[in-house]
Amino acid sequence: MKNLAVSRRYAKALILIGQEDGQAEQYNEELGAVVGLFDTQDGFELALTNPLYNKNDRKKVLQAVLVATDLSAIMKSFLVLLFDKGRIGFLREIASYYKDLADELKGVVKASVISATELSSDAIEKIKEALSKKAGKTIVLNVEQDPSLIGGVVTKIGDLVLDGSVKTQLINMRETLKKGESV
């Protein structure tokens, strides 16, 4: 839980800087590029995070890589700060939170729809349009399938959950009947 809070804090700090200087989207791309470097260069992330290596040597590796990149001065400073504070290992989570914050700035919201059966592309578009109208923002929709729902859909937008599944309706009906109330 602490890792999540730390990652959020650094992502929020960087997005505030990005808003201030108008470079929020550039920083998003640069964070993605550094995470991509971690993914493609075997041992790079380990060389920066492994405490068995001398801290000064690890910092020299980071600085050598930063010199060879075309990252902005703010991003280079941010990465050095993360390293100095012992938080470079949280970079993936920071980048993920930052991406969500940058999307929010652009008016893009992530939503998910879980259905019991496969939805047609027409149904997905209608759901996307309805959610976009409701939220007043552009929706990026993730569609999943879960046969245990029996029927219907469960829609999630941020913290809001709209559960129209048959499974939930049956559970609610059972609880109502247990209490002896009329349906």
Image (cartoon, helix red, strand yellow):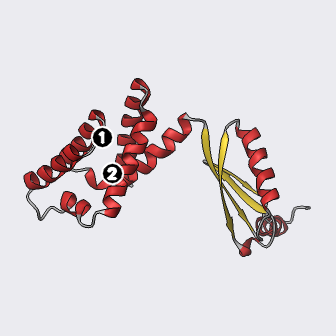
Proximity of marks 1 and 2: CB atoms separated by less than 8 Å: yes
Left or right: 2 as drawn, with respect to 127: left
* Spot occupied by residue 104 in the image (x, y as percentages of width and height): 55, 38
Residue topped by disc 1: 71
Can you tell which quarter of the image residue 20 is in?
Answer: top left
Q: Where 13 sits versus 38, above or below?
A: above
* Spot occupied by residue 2 in the image (x, y as percentages of width and height): 35, 52
Judged from the image, the secondary structure of the residue bearing numbered disc 1 is loop
Where the N terminus falls, by quadrant?
Answer: bottom left
Between residues 73 and 18, which one lies in front from this camera angle? 73
Q: Earlier in the sequence, mark 1 or mark 2?
A: 2
Q: Give the amino acid type for the residue marked by disc 2 in the picture.
A: Val
Residue topped by disc 2: 34
Residue at the spot 47% in from the left edge and 45% down from the top edge: 99
Q: Where 151 sits versus 77, above or below?
A: below
Q: Is residue 5 visible?
A: no
Residue at the spot 81% in from the left edge and 51% down from the top edge: 126
